[in-house]
Amino acid sequence: MLRIGTGQDNKMELEFFGAAGEVTGSCHILRVGGRQLLLDCGMIQGGRDAPQRNRLPFPFQVDAIDAVILSHAHIDHCGRLPLLIRRGYRGPIHTNPACAELLPILLRDSAELAARDAERKNRNGAANDPAVEPLYTLEDVEQVLKQLRTIPYNKRVDVLPGVVAQVRDAGHIMGSSSVEVWLTEGSGKAVVRRKLVFSGDLGQYNSPILQDPWQFSSADIVLMETTYGDRRHRDRAATELEFGEILQQAWRDRGNVIIPAFAIGRSQDVLYLLGKHADEWQVGRWQIFLDSPMAIEASAVYWRHPEQYDVEATRLRRDFSMMPPLPNIRFCRTPDESRAINKMRSGAIIIAGSGMCNGGRVLHHLKHNLDRPESHVIITGFQAPGTLGRQIVDRAPSVRIHGETIRVAATVHTLGGLSAHGDQDDLLRWVRNFRARPPVYLVHGEVSSATAFGARLQQESFQSVVASPGLKLDLSTLRPLADDFSS
Ligand code: ZN
């Protein structure tokens, strides 16, 4: 096929576009034998300029992309796929089957947010401002879904001529992958072969439900996430113990427990821990509400894929007739079901989105419970500056919800250790398995975190580079180290 304007034919090359020097917007491109493969196509999130940056033209020719491999369903990895489609991409999008089931949940929500955002801008703009179009629409999302091609874990597949790929369980969320790519260019004596491993997002070791991240041993180059490259999480056992103690205290106080939770991953972890410790924590005396249509849908995907469970979750699932093993759980799909919870003054555990309390149903639960000293709020994840969740964590004496000032009298707990990302120790444990110490390019982390992790890597005899956007590498110049090319 004749390609005009790419100028990259016959060059084995890697270029970084997104999540380079920052956490979000994951997107990298591999070029081999005149073909181009995109790794992820994520949304840029956070920061005032994120909406404009997401609208910019892609810094590559969209119709010159031949294939996409998607590591997982978080929006900062998949969120601009509908835009890629809108701008003309018609090729395959390869991903794990469980990821393919989570994608519609996240992408449809993202398209609806984009529509509401455009509507608000058009309402608030001056009469002669040009109309704002949504970033993409539900139709674009449906087209993404049509172009999905699922690949199971642990099976090598031919993605393009000269490109063989394999996805491995990254243990981060259901269906999350690390990606191995074997690249071959030329033939006979002139053949060039290189292998790249892209970590995707890596989960914690010993996290609930999911398996540990797959351990690789061989690569010529590694692309590695560094979200928590400079931090350590709280110990998992201590986290579970603390969760149990909070519930005991809340029961004694005769209050409700509000858990703002992220729909995918954290909600399922919380439910799983309630099920796992049901007897010990006397969970049966509570009424549990999963008050988020998105989390309910995502939970169904989690329970549909027991093949991705770790040993403990597999055993739990065998012993119980339902997952999660909680007979006292109610799934609240409609707004009326959600509002009905407001009547309960005690004995309710309410899991509702959004995770950072910057929208969603959790707002009205907070409005009804925050000002009562017998209430307990459990924060389970990172709270970005400027969010209501952050104000609550920072112990603001009062907060504004739906235009009302609410006094914060409830007890607020921050439950560390439930992060979907591995910490510095987990990341080191993962990378140490590369026996020949290939060069490591650090992505998906603030520069400070990636730099701190790079310093640790040096102590382990790894050379590393903090990737920057637009950085291009000629892969043929890498020292060949990989020993698992199949001929
Ligand atoms: Zn992720």
Image: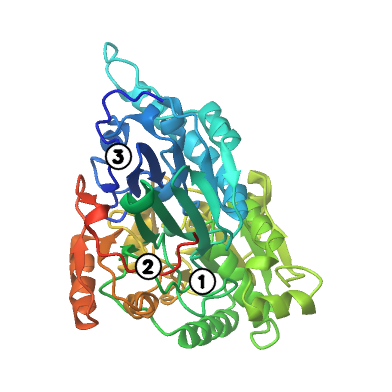
Q: Residues within 10 Å of mark 1 (few under 14, many from 20)?
A: many
Relative to 126, say whether 142 is above or below: below
Quadrant where the N terminus sits is top left
Marks 2/1: CA–CA distance: 56 Å
Residue type at numbered disc 1: Ser
Depth-wise, is mark 2 or mark 1 nearer the camera? 2
Disc 3 to disc 2, C-alpha distance: 21 Å
Q: Which mark is residue 10?
A: 3
Q: Is residue 41 visible?
A: no
Q: Secondary structure at mark 1?
A: loop
Q: Nearer the viewer, mark 3 or mark 1?
A: 3
Q: Residue shown at 43%/77% (left/top)?
A: 417
Query: Which residue is labeled 2 in the image?
Result: 482
Sequence order check, earlier mark of 3 and 1? 3
- Say which amino acid is labelled 3: Asn
The one of 331 and 317 positioned closer to us in this rendering: 317
- Label 3: few (<14), some (14–19) or many (≥20) C-alpha neighbours in 10 Å: few
Q: Position of residue 451 (x, y in %)?
A: 18, 68
Circle nearer the N terminus (3, 2): 3
User: Which percent across, then down, holds residue 348?
Assistant: 63, 68
Left or right of residue 78: residue 446: left
The quadrant where residue 398 appears: bottom left
Q: Mark 2: which secondary structure? A: loop
Q: Earlier in the sequence, mark 2 or mark 1?
A: 1
Q: Position of residue 257 (x, y in %)?
A: 55, 70
Q: Quadrant location of residue 34? A: top left
Q: CA distance from mark 3 to mark 1?
A: 64 Å
- Looking at mark 1, is its residue's CB closer than 8 Å to ligand 1? no
| Mark 1, residue position | 375
